[in-house]
Structures are given as C-alpha cells and as structure tokens.
Amino acid sequence: MKIEKVLDAHLKESFYRVTHPSGLDIFIYPKAGYTKKFAYFMTKYGALYNQFTNEKGESFSLPLGVAHFLEHKIFEDEEKDIFQEFSKLGASVNAYTNYASTVYYFNTVKDFEPALKLLVDFVLTPHLTEENVEKEKGIITQEIKMYDDDPDWRAYFNGLKTLYQKHPMGEDIAGTEASVKGTTLEDLNRAYDHFYSPRNMALLVAGDVDADEMIAYIDGILPEAFLKKKSSGRLVLDEEPLSPGSSETNMAMGIPTPIFNFFIKGPGAALTPEDYKASIVRRIALEYLFGKGSAFFNTAYEEGLLNSTFGYEYSYGQGYSYLAFGGESSDPRRMTAGIQSTLEAFDREGMDAASFMRIKRKILGRNISAFNSIQTIANNFIGHYIKGVDIFDGMKMVEGITMEEVEKSLGLTLKDRTVLSVVR
C-alpha cells in the first residue's frame, strides 16, 4: 500500500493519498479540533455513461438514467432501513448523481467508525431484485415530473437538449419516463459490475482523525469480493457536431416574468489539469464581464432587464464545454444581444490590470476561507478529484494565471454556436 502525504506549506494544510493494492483511491484529510467528521464514497460513473466498453473490449449500451436509478437502489436493503441505521448512530447520510460521478456520503459527530463501515457495506453489497427495481420506477418517474414542473429547470435543460445533438449532456440525469420504465435488473447489475469496482472508486475521510489508524481501519473493512474485482468501464461518446440542433427553443408555463438561458457551445474538453486551469481562467473573465460590479450588470439592472436571479457559468467535462447565462428578464432577446456584444468587445479590448488583480485576489481569498469549513473541504475535495486535480492545485493555478491568458480565454465564435432557451 502506497501512502503519500500531500502538503501545502502556504495554507498549512495537508492530506494523505493512499493507493490501495486493489486500485481503490483512499484520501484522509485530518482536521484537528473539528467536531464533525465526513466520509465520501464515490464512483466515476454518472449520467454520461450510457455507452461504454470494458477491459475485454465488449461494448454495452444502457438506458438513459441508469446511474441515477442505481443510486436509488443502492440504499435498498432487505432487512433494514439504511437511513434509520445511520440515524441510530447519530449520522446523516445522502447521495447524488451528476454527469461524471455518483457519490454517497455521511457526516456525524460520534460513532464515526461504525457509520463508515455501514457506508462501505451498503454501497458494496447491493440488494437488487426484479421486484424492488419495478417498485422504484414509479418513484423516479414522479421525480422526473417534479423537475418538469420547475420553470428554471425547464429553461436550462431545454437549452442543453437543443445545444447537444448526440452527446448525453443533452439528456436528463434521471433519464426519461420511457427509459426508466424500460430499465431492467440486468441493466443495473451490468452498470454496478463494471463501475463499482476498486479501480473506478475513491473513499475520502475528513475530520479530526488519526491518519494511520483510519487507513488501517478502512483496509480492514473492505470486503474481499470487492477487492478482487478487476472490471471497469470506459466511456464511449459519439462525435458531437459543433453546431447546436437549432438556435432557439421556447415553451410557456404559468410564470409572471420570462426566464431565459443563453448558451454558447464550446469544443469537447476532458478531465485534465489543463482543462481545469482553463476553466478557472474563463471564470475570471466571466466575473469581470458579468459580475455584479460589471458595467454590463449595472446597465442591464438600471434598464430593468435583469434582477438578482441573473447568473453565468462555464461548464465542461468529457467531450463537452459551454458558457451559460440566465435568469428572469422582461426582454430575453435584448439580454442575449447585450451578452454577445459584451463578449465581442472583450475580444477587442481586453481588461484592465486593476480589475484583473482585484478578481484574482477575490478568488484566492474565497479559496483560502473555504479551508475553514470541514464540509466545504470535503465537497471541494471530491469536486477536484473528479476534475483530475487535487484540492491544493486550484490555489496554485490561480496564483500563476496571467492577464493575457484571461484576455484570450473567451475567443469563441458566436455564429451558429448559440442557443436561446426561453420559458414564457
């Protein structure tokens, strides 16, 4: 077992990276003096993985939403209620599925080791049957309908569905009612067998713990059958055209003010340190151009075109990237025109040095303060891990970013690569 201590001398923070012989990544983040402890058990398997190959070269195709469906069923147990078992230990447990991963986690102030064993046990010993799979389909379809009734979600997701023609980013994480109804026990078992394996998973413990003792404890509770698993799935993506399916999508719902989302489609990215740094660079540019202190925001606010719901983001992952802007607006088309002209002006004029340094210091300060919260540390740690970097890398990257890099970061051709999604 390889154990490495990773230290950031500037932050005076450290964690332990453990490469288990089975291939499982284990991370221990000691944080003395904190009462709560957190554990995150995750797999690099999310909603993108509808098509994949295994180590034997076999190809598989699964219905939309299987990763999310499987997350639901992992909590199933024939003899006990998993949530109640954690509650008896004074622990709070939950899970989530996104496009790249599925994460199971809990926090507690006492009985941490029994709760950690319970987490490992229920994730690694699923109880999947034809009967409980069929029972879950109604629950998930109700969840899908609930999101369908949310106008903010509809504005965003309708845009993504239009933006991507072949890439699964254009599909709901939960799938569709039809894909859920068509999901079988065989589908769930196939996904579990390929992606819930040591080489595809990671376990993080954060809190006031002794690293050596915790590493030994974890090594002792990992089931032998899990440690012997060698299977793994490799994502397969169809080639995605750079142009969206169309430039606009509209729908009507019972809301007083229109909600819009404006997307600009970027090239396919990957989960590498280089792509992570590029995301930070673009976020600096976006804050300069569209943050609450920007000329764009103040002008649009004074003209009554936006309110506090306005937001923006750069999102990327395996085979996709895009810029997104959205919120409530009485005139979505004017907002879109303003966003486009602001981006075009930035390509010509760049930014001033004072603003660059101010935003850079703001981001650094935000990152430093995040290390005061053990929950934020744990959340950020997992988020960084999925992106292919560790939690200290982001700080180092921000410090090294230049103004020239930021000025070149949004050089996107707007023609034929945008989608305006409006809920009226």
Image (cartoon, rainbow, N blue to C red):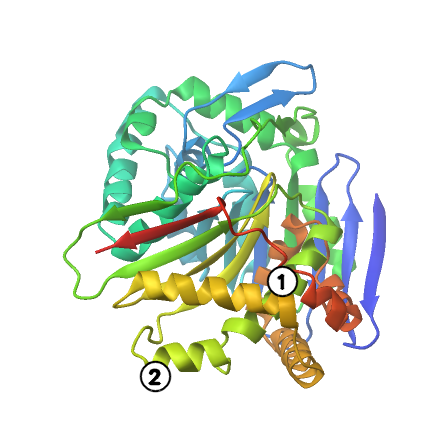
Q: Is residue 147 visible?
A: yes
> Is 370 located above or below residue 73 in the figure?
below
Res. 351 mark = none
Q: Quadrant of the N terminus?
A: top right
Res. 302 mark = 2
Quarter occupied by residue 231: top right
Is the residue marked by circle 2 packed among few (<14), some (14-19), or many (20+) residues within 10 Å?
few
Is the residue marked by circle 1 packed among few (<14), some (14-19), or many (20+) residues within 10 Å?
many
Q: Could you tell me which residue is drawn at 68 percent across and 78 percent down?
A: 356
Q: Which residue type carries mark 2?
A: Glu
Residue in the foreground of this view, choosing between 353 and 396: 353
Quarter occupied by residue 345: bottom right
Horizontal side of residue 139 vs 272, given as left or right: left
Res. 282 mark = 1
Q: How many marks?
A: 2
Quarter occupied by residue 9: bottom right
Task: List x then y, in percent, for residue 197.
Answer: 63, 32
Task: List x then y, in percent, for residue 94.
Answer: 44, 52
User: Whole-Å distance between the Cαs marked 2 and 1?
Assistant: 26 Å
Front label number (2 vs 1):
2
Residue in the foreground of this view, choosing between 111 and 20: 20
Horizontal side of residue 30 vs 123, given as left or right: right
Task: List x then y, in percent, for residue 65.
Answer: 41, 33
Task: List x then y, in percent, for residue 153.
Answer: 32, 52
Q: Residue furthest left?
A: 254
Q: Could you tell me which residue is drawn at 64 percent across and 28 percent down?
A: 234
Horizontal side of residue 110 vs 14, given as left or right: left
Element type at marker 1? helix
Residue in the foreground of this view, choosing between 83 and 307: 307
Q: If you read the primary sequence from the N terminus, does the residue marked by circle 2 or circle 1 appear first?
A: 1
